[in-house]
Image (cartoon, rainbow, N blue to C red):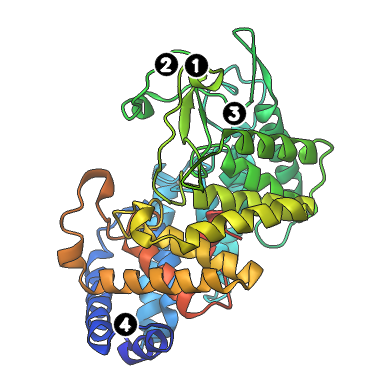
């Protein structure tokens, strides 16, 4: 690895002491040496995540042939994962939608991937219809509107890059399915939003307020903020649907209705039960962590993009004010115990970076730099700083959302702010 290059680039952006940056570089070199050994035994899912990291690591490889060899090793893993069914869902995380976005980006750097991308397009064209079948009795029961494994991520994939006639049609059908899914309806005599759902058995294990009547989720990763942002981005891409604007406005209203304030800082409740939504049970209004997946920054970023799509300058000003207040908070008050993207420091760093790009407000740049330095310091001493993190908080090695792949790509984004990488796209941060 060209460790001197990454040292120089980080040195130009960081306020950390040289000794810390030198330790970061040592850990960086060790990470990629470990990757070269591990690459033969990683899973197909991890191979996609590693591919997305390698795309933006190319300039730090001294040997182009070494970089290409790792790329092709990962591509073989991905192909195998598609054939064996490991990557056969349409989802944007661990599924073919994400594979398509990654391989399309990679095709600009590596020759000979045209047939692979064409095959992926044809495969997605065949399997997406089962996800958007509104006549399926389970369509309105499952949590299928969400970003991680649902329709929002699929839509995001479909509108990425050049909109071919093939994917323009799929995009419209996916929008139609999302709008159908999100249409308000009657339930037990109450009018409720369309994003009311019943959790899976796995999700039920993590729910502290059990309810047999379902839930409503406001987060970006698994909640309604995801489809709000996806629909808004589709609208900005010029994909027309006669109900898209009305749906976006309804979802904005639902999110704004659910907000609450603690010490003049805006928060959302995350997942609530049907009984809490109709006012039969109390929603506990306490500060929660400032994460991308469920926290205020991720939801506010979504609302900002929706306001951009609608041309709503008043809402945009409100959102900038609220995120600005969060940026001024001491980082310790963010309640972030991990450096990862999903619910940690890296996700918050990306949100601050995107808000600065959109507004040129220095408060966002100042917070981005603070958080980026924390990420660099954490990576430099990851063996000691993160060894206490276990279970859901543990930092995985080759995961974007939950691991060092995402942390390194966030650092890359802070070093070179002239692009948005594919993972920022699939997180709806554009």
**Residue at label 3?**
195
Which SS class for mark 3?
Answer: loop
Q: Residues within 10 Å of mark 4 (few under 14, many from 20)?
A: some
> Residue sitting at 71 percent across and 50 percent down?
315
Which SS class for mark 2?
Answer: loop
Observer-side mark, 4 or 3, equals: 4
State the quadrant of the C terminus: bottom right
- Residue 383 locus on image (x, y percent): 16, 66
**Residue at label 2?**
211
Q: In the image shown, does 376 or 284 lie closer to the viewer?
A: 284
- Whether 358 is drawn above or below 283: the answer is below
State the quadrant of the N terminus: bottom left
**Residue 250 vs residue 220: left or right?**
right
Per the model, the C-alpha gap separating discs 1 and 4 is 49 Å
Which SS class for mark 4?
Answer: loop
**Residue at label 1?**
275
Q: In the image shown, does 306 or 392 lie closer to the viewer?
A: 306
């Amino acid at each position: 690895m060209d460790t001197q290059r990454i040292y120089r680039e980080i040195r130009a952006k960081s306020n950390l002491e040289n000794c810390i940056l030198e330790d970061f570089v040592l850990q960086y070199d060790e990470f990629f040496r470990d990757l070269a050994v591990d690459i033969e035994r990683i899973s197909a899912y991890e191979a996609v995540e590693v591919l997305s990291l390698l795309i933006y690591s190319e300039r730090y490889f001294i040997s182009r042939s070494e970089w290409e060899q790792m790329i092709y090793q990962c591509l073989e893993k991905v192909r195998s994962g598609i054939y064996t069914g490991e990557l056969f869902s349409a989802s944007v995380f661990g599924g073919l939608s994400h594979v398509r976005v990654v391989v399309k980006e990679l095709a600009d750097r590596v020759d000979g991937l045209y047939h692979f991308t064409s095959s992926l397009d044809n495969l997605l064209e065949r399997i997406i219809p089962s996800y958007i079948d509104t006549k399926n009795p389970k369509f309105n029961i499952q949590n299928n509107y969400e970003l991680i494994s649902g329709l929002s991520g699929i839509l995001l994939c479909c509108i990425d890059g050049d909109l071919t006639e093939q994917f323009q049609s799929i995009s419209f059908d996916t929008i139609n399915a999302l709008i159908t899914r999100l249409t308000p309806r009657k339930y037990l005599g109450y009018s409720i939003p369309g994003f009311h759902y019943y959790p899976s058995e796995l999700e039920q294990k993590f729910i502290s307020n059990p309810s047999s009547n379902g839930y409503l989720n406001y987060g970006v990763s698994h909640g309604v903020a995801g489809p709000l942002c996806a629909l808004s981005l589709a609208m900005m891409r010029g994909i027309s649907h006669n109900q898209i604007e009305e749906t976006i406005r309804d979802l904005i209203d639902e999110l704004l209705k659910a907000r609450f304030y603690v010490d003049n800082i805006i928060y959302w409740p995350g997942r609530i039960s049907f009984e809490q939504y109709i006012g039969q049970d109390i929603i506990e209004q306490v500060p929660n962590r400032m994460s991308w997946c469920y926290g205020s920054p991720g939801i506010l970023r979504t609302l900002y993009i929706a306001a951009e799509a609608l041309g709503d300058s008043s809402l945009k000003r409100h959102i900038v004010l609220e995120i600005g207040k969060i940026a001024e908070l001491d980082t310790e008050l963010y309640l972030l115990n991990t450096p990862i993207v999903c619910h940690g420091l890296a996700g918050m760093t990306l949100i601050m970076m995107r808000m600065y790009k959109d507004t040129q407000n220095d408060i966002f740049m100042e917070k981005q730099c603070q958080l980026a330095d924390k990420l660099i310091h954490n990576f430099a001493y990851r063996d000691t700083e993160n060894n206490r993190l276990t279970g859901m908080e543990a930092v995985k090695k080759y995961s974007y959302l939950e691991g060092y792949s995402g942390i390194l790509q966030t650092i890359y984004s802070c070093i070179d702010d002239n692009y948005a990488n594919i993972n920022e796209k699939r997180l709806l941060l554009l």
